[in-house]
Image: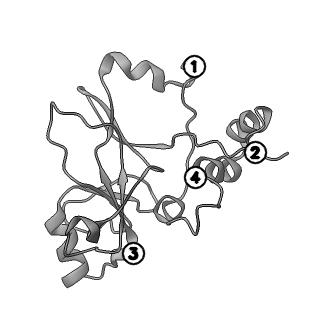
Amino acid sequence: RERARLPVVLLTRRTSEGTEGLSLGVWSGSLLGDLNFSKFMTRPLYIGGPMHTDVEQPLEMLHAYPECPGSQRLTPDGLTLLNDWHKACDWIEEGPGSSMRFKFFLYRVRWLPEEERELTPGAGVWMAARCSRDLILREPDSAYEEPLWSQIADRAGGDLAMVAREHGLLPE
């Protein structure tokens, strides 16, 4: 079975202007230190979506510290979003945070209100699944491990795993 690289998007924000999310599995090939960052130097930089030139897009960070100032809690188990570099640095230097519990993203995925229909289950474009904060924040052990979507589908079971198996994307 060939290892399909299907997208996994974490929805992070929904407003009257549309829905935003982060694509979770696209590594830029660079560590923050490669890009002359002086903090979080060993952390990978992920591409969270296509570049949009019409709006400024800050560096987005997923982390496991809902009590970190400026953070937006996304899940009940404490997956949190932050887009303030200085607050992240302060949290690991002066607070209880570990740099290993942060994941960094450049850009994000956006759906305008007229495009949001594709997010509904009936549209057949995306399949929603819940997964743990720890699964989202972990770094792959190697290039040979199963892709994130496969790990989520396998753990989630139900319709998601059934459809993946029907298409030969998960083992029986």
Residue farthest to the top, as pictured: 114
User: Looking at the picture, does residue 118 appear above or below residue 74?
Assistant: above
Circle 3 — which element?
helix
Q: Nearer the viewer, mark 1 or mark 4?
A: 4
Q: Which residue is mark 2?
A: 170
Using the image, tell me which numbered label, if any, was put on residue 100. 3
At x 15%, y 30%, the residue is 54
At x 29%, y 74%, the residue is 41
Q: Amino acid at mark 4?
A: Leu
User: Looking at the picture, does residue 151 appear above or below residue 17?
Assistant: below
At x 54%, y 65%, the residue is 140
CA gap, disc 2 and disc 1: 23 Å
Q: Residues within 10 Å of mark 3 (few under 14, many from 20)?
A: some
Q: Amino acid at mark 1?
A: Gly
CA gap, disc 3 and disc 2: 30 Å
User: Looking at the picture, does residue 94 appear above or below residue 63?
Assistant: below
CA gap, disc 3 and disc 1: 38 Å
Circle 1 — which element?
helix
